[in-house]
Image (tube, grey):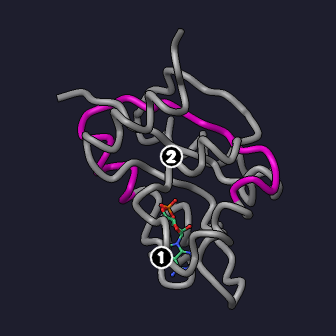
């Protein structure tokens, strides 16, 4: 069944000129890009997006990093794309993400943390619906 997911190209991806490469990999896989926008995330958006991580030790640095520059929000559609994009992205830590994945091929090991991992992808249909509404608000 075709579905939609929310992909964020994080500020490190934009800064490193990897936007085109990441979008190319999404399209090469056969997924459709059905909405796209570059924006500087507000604190409110990020607090809502990362609500489940509030209070964790990496929460504040994560919000700071995510607002350190523009990011690209992408609505991606395809068969089982929620699961499929997360496989395409690779595991959270770029150091151990498999070669062939976005994080495994393009991610850098910054030694200190895993927040600069280039992309975000929704982890469930519920998250996808919530996150798409958040980043592509209508009305
Ligand atoms: P993302 O898929 O956007 O969802 C939560 C983010 O928190 C994750 O990618 C990482 O960027 C970040 N993150 C998760 N675990 C850690 C951690 N242990 N230290 C720092 N950042 C983390």
Q: Is residue 85 above or below residue 64?
A: above
Where in the figure is residue 112, as x and y percent of width and height? 68, 89
The residue positioned 49% from the left and 76% from the top of the image is 56
Q: Is mark 2 within 8 Å of ligand 1?
A: no
Residue drawn 55% across the image and 81% down it: 57
Residue at the (69%, 56%) spot, across then down: 66
Question: Regarding mark 1 in the picture, which secondary structure is present there?
Answer: loop
Q: Quadrant of the N terminus?
A: top left
- Residue 128: x and y in percent read 35, 39
- Please indicate whether residue 14 sits to the left or right of residue 47 in the image: right
Q: Which residue in the protein does label 2 denote?
A: 48
| Magenta-span inclusion, residue 77 | yes
Percent position of residue 10, x then y: 66, 53
Marker disc for residue 1: none
Q: Does residue 60 sit above or below 8 in this rendering?
A: below
Query: Dot 2: what SS?
Result: helix
Q: Residue at x 81, y 58 (%)?
A: 16
Cα distance in 3D space between marks 1 and 2: 27 Å
Residue 35 sits in quarter: top right
Q: Which residue is mark 1?
A: 97
Q: Residues within 10 Å of mark 1 (few under 14, many from 20)?
A: many
Instruction: Give the percent coordinates (x, y) of residue 40.
Output: 76, 40
Q: Which badge, 1 or 2, is on the more N-terminal residue? A: 2
Horizontal side of 84 relative to 17 (left or right) equals left
Q: Nearer the viewer, residue 137 or 37?
A: 137
Q: Residues within 10 Å of mark 2 (few under 14, many from 20)?
A: some
Q: Is residue 99 magenta?
A: no
Q: Are marks 1 and 2 in contact (CB under 8 Å)?
A: no
Viewer-nearest of discs 1 and 2: 2
Question: What is the magenta range?
Answer: 66-87
- Please tell me which residue lies in front, 8 or 77: 8
């Amino acid at each position: 069944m075709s579905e939609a997911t929310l992909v964020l190209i994080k500020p490190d991806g934009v800064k490193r000129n990897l936007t085109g490469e990441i979008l190319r990999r999404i399209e090469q896989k056969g997924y459709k890009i059905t909405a796209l926008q570059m924006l500087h995330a507000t604190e409110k958006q990020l607090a809502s997006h990362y609500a489940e991580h509030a209070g964790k030790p990496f929460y504040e640095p994560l919000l700071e990093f995510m607002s350190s520059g523009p990011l690209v929000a992408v609505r991606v559609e395809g068969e089982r794309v929620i699961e499929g994009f997360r496989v395409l992205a690779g595991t959270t830590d770029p150091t151990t993400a498999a070669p062939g994945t976005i994080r495994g091929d393009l991610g850098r090991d910054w030694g200190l943390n895993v927040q600069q991992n280039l992309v975000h992808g929704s982890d469930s249909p519920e998250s996808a619906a919530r996150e798409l509404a958040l980043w592509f608000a209508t009305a």
